[in-house]
Image (cartoon, helix red, strand yellow):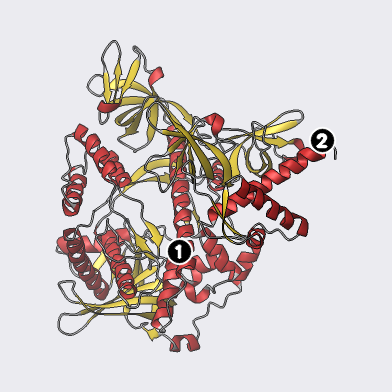
Amino acid sequence: MSRRNKTRKKSNDSSLTKRILTTLRKQNSKPTNYKQIASILDVTDTTTRNLIIKILKKLQSEDKIEEIIRGKYIIKASKNYYIGIADVTSRGQAYIIVDDLDDDIFINNKNLNHTLHGDTVEVYVFKRNKGGKQEGEVTQIIERKRTEFVGVIKIQERFAFVECQDVKMYTDVFIPKENINNAQNGEKVLVEIESWPEKASSPYGNVIKVLGKPGEHNTEIHSILAQYGLPYEFEKEIEDYASNINTSINKEEIKKRRDMRDDLTFTIDPKDAKDFDDALSFKVLDGGIYEIGIHIADVSHYLTPGTILDKEAFNRATSVYLVDRVVPMLPEVLSNNACSLRPNEEKFTFSAVFKINNKAEIIDKWFGRTVTYSDARFAYEEAQYIIESEYLKEPQTVTIPSETSITGKSYEVKNTITEAILKLNELAKVLRKKRMKEGAISFDKVEVKFNLDENNNPAGVYFKESKDANKLIEEFMLLANRSVAEFIGKQNPKKTFIYRVHDEPNDEKIAALQNIIKQFGYKLDTRDRKSTSNSLNNLLKDVQGKKEQNLVDTLAIRTMSKAVYTTQNIGHYGLAFDYYTHFTSPIRRYPDIMAHRLLSYYLEEGKTANEDQYEQKCRHSSEMEGLASQAERASIKYMQVKYMSDHQDQNFLGVISGVTDWGIYVEIVSNKCEGMVRLQDIKGDHYTFHKDEYAAIGDRTKTNYQLGDEVYVRVKNADLVRKQLDFEILGHKTDVVIN
């Protein structure tokens, strides 16, 4: 055998050995024989199956595996080997997060062995560093988190490489000339990693999509979606399938449902909404009782499990709301038409119907499929005008003025609808008061919105606040979600269901929040759960309208645990609910569709569904929700940079929102745009970061830039490609004269 062939055989044996060890580790001490290993590895040829047997014997002799039962093996326990998730820093180092360990394992760049951010890896811990932290080396990559990245291609004479825009991607991607897919030098591209040779400094890949010229609007928006692995269009076969679905309101189906078409029904949504998930119905009964229906688009009626459309909806898991567009979970023929509860149209719905008294006590409830007719559509602003008209002592027949109307024309609202909205608002306030008393936390964070011109350029900034009309809808959606979860969650025997859970905040995060807010003169009472939630609510109330509001709101939200989907109910801390699910937005969230299907199944006396299958679906939905949120934040950041690039000659008053050893972050008061002042760029002195004081202090002048300080800044650089905003600091508010 030639030396070359010997080397190749050795490499193949080594690769197979690693795969066998990985397989045994994933089995979690479940004894496994060579046939099972071959099946898992998709090995069918006799030669390789025999090689698996030889390798198993060799690993046993090396004391790496143990034969528990004749022919069945488990991995031998080692205190030095762990499996975890890699968190790669922008400096090209990593921390491996292991479930069973309190501390993360530090990995130096030289010991990453081609690990990328988010990868599942095996790590060997070999020492503790000077700080007492565990340090180790990645011994194998078990599973890549992602293989596709966005970047700018640089084309050389014989090859090309892609500079990735992800800060956690510490290496370029090498592209053979034949794999550039007609990309032009300097264009943004989506690149896929195909291999990473052992001794190569960069992975090898190919360009799978050309996104366009950096800085152009559509290029940057498509880049954001591609970076997070999110689609921005439907394949033709998906669109065709959706278009061929029978969406008629036929008599046969109506007979199977509760007919509520004669009940007064209306929707309240944002003025620019195109899909209407939910509607409210209102009926006055005898004895001071009201029948309130919460009607949700019956998406599950049209979405058959296992079809290409259902699979596509599951893969997407959520609609993505970017600054200039919505990337829907469902094709428009369903999301904006068949399933949307549009005014003056009959629709199939899934409803939660309640009988409620004036104290907002639930007398009775009913869940099931319905057919409804929406009598009217209101924007939040229109509903708010009706609510405020009560306090203005106006007649019950309310005229919506042209400047408030979504049609641009004034019109009269029927007395019956006015009375319904006012009573629903009254009941919503009672429900909200009860929730807050039980320990719910009120996050009414101000949202920053952009007015866009016809070319999607930001023409201005405005702030979206939650008013009574918003809270009215919120409370009744919460009531439906909570009630559905309770209905199934309290059944005996236990039934598998989709819960939306929210764990209690971590003590360390609460302590960190304490340290920050004391810079502004606030404090928290953390003696117990109720004290903590009350204290947080008081804090959020106290900062309203103050310069530090947005900062404190953001920090408080970050303190909270992340809400996720799961079959294992632990309650919802932020809402103070023991049971909670997502039932009310199936047009834009796949978990809601799953909740509809399970509720329907159990209403028909179905036995419990497969828990493992639904838990996997929950994990996927939570993951996709996280990616969508990141994409949405990235689009906002891009638009902020774009907006500020047109205001480079202006001075802005800002609040210091963060201090690090490399720079000071400043949030502009008037538009909430955030940028960074590099410490090395501050003129007149050398500034040092003081961690305990959340401050950067001049070594000579002792000038102190501290968290929460008001300062004047000017735009130094607005990088649309990297979505970075750099400021020049002019000084403290008290020290700068602005003409």
Q: Position of residue 624 (x, y in %)?
A: 48, 55
- Closer to us: 292 or 283: 292
User: Residue at coordinates 76% horizontally, 59% vertically from top-left?
Assistant: 45
Q: Which mark is residue 718?
A: none
Q: Position of residue 12 (x, y in %)?
A: 72, 45
Q: Is residue 16 left or right of residue 613?
A: right
Q: Is residue 379 left or right of residue 620?
A: left
Badge 2, how many Cα within 10 Å: few under 14, some, many 20+? few
User: Residue at coordinates 44% horizontally, 37% vertically from top-left?
Assistant: 105
Badge 1, how many Cα within 10 Å: few under 14, some, many 20+? some
User: Residue at coordinates 48% horizontally, 88% vertically from top-left?
Assistant: 251
Q: Is residue 455 left or right of residue 567?
A: right
- Closer to us: 592 or 655: 592
User: Residue at coordinates 15% horizontally, 83% vertically from top-left?
Assistant: 287
Indicate the amino acid at tag 2.
Arg
Q: Inspect this view and state whether residue 547 appears.
A: no
Q: Position of residue 504 (x, y in %)?
A: 28, 53
**Figure check: 702 above or below 218:** above
**Figure check: 150 above or below 403:** above
Residue of label 1:
615
Q: Quadrant of the N terminus?
A: top right
Q: Position of residue 248 (x, y in %)?
A: 52, 80
Q: Inspect this view and state whether residue 653 appears.
A: yes
Disc 1 versus disc 2: distance between alpha carbons?
50 Å
Residue of label 2:
3
SS of the residue under disc 1:
helix
Indicate the amino acid at tag 1.
Glu
Q: Determine the image quadrant of residue 574.
A: bottom left
Q: Quadrant of the C terminus?
A: top left
